[in-house]
Image (tube, rainbow, N blue to C red):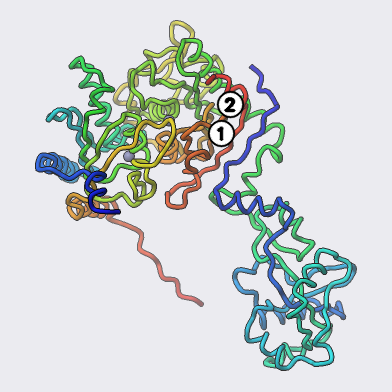
């Protein structure tokens, strides 16, 4: 692929975007400090935060309550309160999230026609923006519109938080017992 | 509505399994590999020879599915070792008895097999049995002249395969413990009538929800989640996108949240009470009323004969959270009139459902059409998927 083409296809991260990502990272840190999954996620429309989310899987007992889905609900509520047309707002909203959205969330973002997602580290287990599947860009009929991604902003920072969390989560991880052969 | 019986539940397999199945269906039989075998001339030696060979010439790991001995037109044959064993092949080439080296040995009586052997005519050598085992002190009493035979090079995935492949050489069959496999996924062709009726009546619930929804002028799409152990209906809903203006409230997403509410959680507290249309049917109501224990307290009959969720007080909620209830949707079955989209399919995967039955395929569907998420080896959970359940009725609702 030639450079020019790349420039058109891949949006470049702006200083404003970096500021929003900083806020997302602060949210992730807050979550970590409170023993929650350290994923920060916010949705920005017209230079203001219209939705924020953190993982709510445990308290809702609903495995689909990822930070992105919670933030999407908040945007919806914000639109109702402010008399805005939600589908118009979503089409103009950027998602900032510290970890690559999973396949499910990527699907939801397509349905909402979110144009751009800025994220930190890859999600090797469930990633829907290229890691496991590329829901963001694939040609999928009847499934909203594809969206663009700016990936890899402060990857190490996002990864470190997740590592710290999973270490806390599993203090007594089973030690592999070495059996002696008789 | 009685479930019509014209449909078939068709397993949605991985691409690899589908390819394998096609190859087998095309009559080409299993993939084959060449083995040296020898007739057992003295049947009293059978178990001794079998033990001796197991020690001296164990099967390679990938060929462990082969049985050592077969019975072929009243005589016994025993497998020696794969002809691809280079070291041994060189023995046969260098030390082969010139008198017999052009001779082809094969089991009489089986046309398919002799055909397969004949194809390899050019490089078939006929070494003496002693030459094969000259590096050991093995007692070869009772073994006849070795011959080449084509045997299945992989393990059969079903009893059906096992039977069909026996014309080459008998194999052992072990059903797999987990994942999508052809045996378990053999479709309604091998489904008992009772099982088909059970699947049909569950799909009828989803259909009813979809029909009611369509009668109200919105998308005719329904879903239900069932515990197959008890037959309990844990969720029953229709697509809620048009009613709520939330484009992600597809039937499966709402159904998953209904299950979460039953476990003391849930993310959409207002949805079910406001929405009467989705809570259709007396069947689920009766089943829920008949349920024993704390669950019952969470439901009460609505004024218009519909069931609805009653308020769960905080104490009860916390108590329930601490109970050892099945977390998420582990072990549950999902019935949905249309193939789930990628968002819903992944939501079902996150929820750890065990099976999904759907009616008709949908463009962009992620359980067979655009993706096959349920058998993606990159993901941490796999489940079985069947399509075509009451397909015509489900399709009609979308037209
Ligand atoms: Zn997600
Ligand atoms: Zn869906």
User: Toward the viewer: A94 or B376?
Assistant: A94
Horizontally, residue B199 falls left or right of residue A140, namely: right
Answer with mark 2 or mark 1, whichever residue precedes in sequence. 2
> Could you tell me if residue A38 is visible in this image?
no
Which residue is pictured at 21% across the width and 34% down the height?
A94
Mark 2 = which residue?
B202
* Quadrant in which the N terminus of chain B is drawn: top right
Viewer-side label of 2, 1: 1
Report the quarter where the C terminus of chain B lies.
top right
Task: Tell me if B5 is positioned left or right of B60 in this view.
Answer: right
Tell me the subunit letter for badge 1.
B
Marks 2 and 1, Cα distance to the nearest angstrom? Answer: 10 Å
Q: Is residue B218 above or below residue B202?
A: above
Q: Is mark 1 within 8 Å of ligand 2?
A: no
Q: From the viewer's side, name the closer residue of A51 and B201.
A: A51
Please state the chain letter of the residue tagged with numbered disc 2 in the rendered image. Answer: B
Q: Residue B142, position in %: x, y?
A: 84, 84
Secondary structure, mark 1, is strand
Could you tell me which secondary element the residue under label 2 belongs to? helix
Whether residue B65 is visible, yes or no, is yes
Numbered label attached to residue B357: 1
Quadrant position of residue B324? top left
Cβ–Cβ under 8 Å for marks 2 and 1? yes
Residue B392's quadrant in the figure?
A: top right
């Amino acid at each position: 692929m030639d450079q020019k083409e790349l420039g058109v296809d891949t949006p470049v991260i702006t200083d404003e975007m970096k500021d929003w990502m900083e806020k997302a990272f602060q949210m992730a840190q807050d979550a970590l400090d409170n023993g929650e999954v350290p994923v920060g996620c916010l949705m920005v429309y017209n230079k203001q935060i219209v939705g924020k989310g953190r993982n709510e899987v445990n308290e809702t007992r609903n495995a689909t309550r990822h930070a992105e889905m919670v933030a999407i609900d908040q945007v919806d509520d914000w639109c109702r309160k402010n008399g805005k047309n939600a589908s118009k707002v979503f089409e103009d909203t950027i998602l900032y999230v510290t970890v690559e959205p999973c396949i499910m969330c990527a699907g939801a973002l397509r349905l909402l026609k979110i144009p751009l997602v800025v994220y930190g580290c890859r999600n090797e287990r469930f990633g829907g923006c290229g890691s496991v599947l590329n829901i963001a860009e694939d040609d999928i009929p009847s499934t909203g519109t594809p969206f663009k991604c700016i990936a890899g902003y402060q990857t190490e920072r996002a990864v470190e938080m997740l590592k710290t969390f999973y270490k806390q989560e599993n203090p007594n991880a089973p030690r592999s017992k070495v059996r002696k052969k008789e | 509505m009685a479930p019509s019986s014209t449909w078939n539940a068709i397993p949605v397999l991985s691409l690899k399994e589908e390819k394998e199945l096609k190859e087998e269906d095309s009559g080409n039989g299993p993939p084959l590999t060449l083995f040296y075998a020898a007739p057992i001339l003295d049947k009293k030696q059978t178990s001794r020879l079998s033990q001796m060979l197991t020690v001296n010439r164990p099967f390679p790991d990938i060929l462990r599915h082969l049985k050592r001995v077969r019975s072929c037109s009243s005589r016994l044959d025993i497998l020696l070792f794969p002809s691809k064993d280079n070291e041994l092949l060189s023995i046969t080439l260098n030390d082969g008895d010139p008198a017999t080296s052009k001779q082809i040995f094969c089991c009489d009586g089986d046309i398919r097999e002799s055909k397969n052997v004949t194809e390899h005519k050019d490089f078939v050598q006929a070494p003496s049995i002693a030459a094969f085992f000259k590096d050991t002190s093995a007692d070869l009493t009772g073994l006849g002249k070795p011959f080449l035979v084509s045997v299945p090079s992989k393990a059969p995935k079903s009893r059906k395969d096992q039977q069909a492949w026996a014309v080459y050489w008998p194999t052992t069959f072990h059903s797999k413990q987990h994942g999508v496999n052809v045996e378990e996924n053999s479709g309604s062709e091998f489904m008992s009538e009772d099982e088909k009726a059970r699947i049909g009546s569950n799909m009828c619930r989803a259909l009813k929800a979809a029909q009611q929804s369509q009668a109200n002028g919105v998308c005719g799409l329904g879903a239900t989640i069932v515990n197959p152990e008890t037959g309990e209906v844990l969720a029953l809903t229709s697509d809620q996108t048009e009613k709520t203006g939330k484009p992600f409230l597809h039937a499966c997403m709402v159904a998953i949240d209904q299950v979460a509410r039953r476990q003391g959680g849930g993310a959409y507290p207002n949805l079910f009470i406001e929405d009467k249309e989705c809570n259709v049917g007396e069947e689920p109501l009766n089943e829920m009323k008949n349920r024993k224990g704390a669950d019952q307290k969470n439901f009460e009959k609505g004024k218009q004969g519909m069931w609805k969720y009653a308020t769960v007080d905080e104490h009860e909620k916390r108590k329930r959270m601490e109970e050892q209830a099945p977390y998420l949707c582990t072990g549950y079955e999902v019935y949905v009139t249309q193939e789930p989209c990628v968002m819903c399919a992944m939501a079902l995967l996150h929820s750890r459902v065990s099976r999904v039955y759907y009616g008709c395929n949908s463009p962009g569907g992620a359980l067979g059409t655009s993706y096959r998420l349920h058998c993606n080896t990159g993901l941490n959970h796999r489940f079985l998927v069947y399509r075509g359940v009451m397909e015509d009725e489900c399709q009609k609702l979308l037209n």
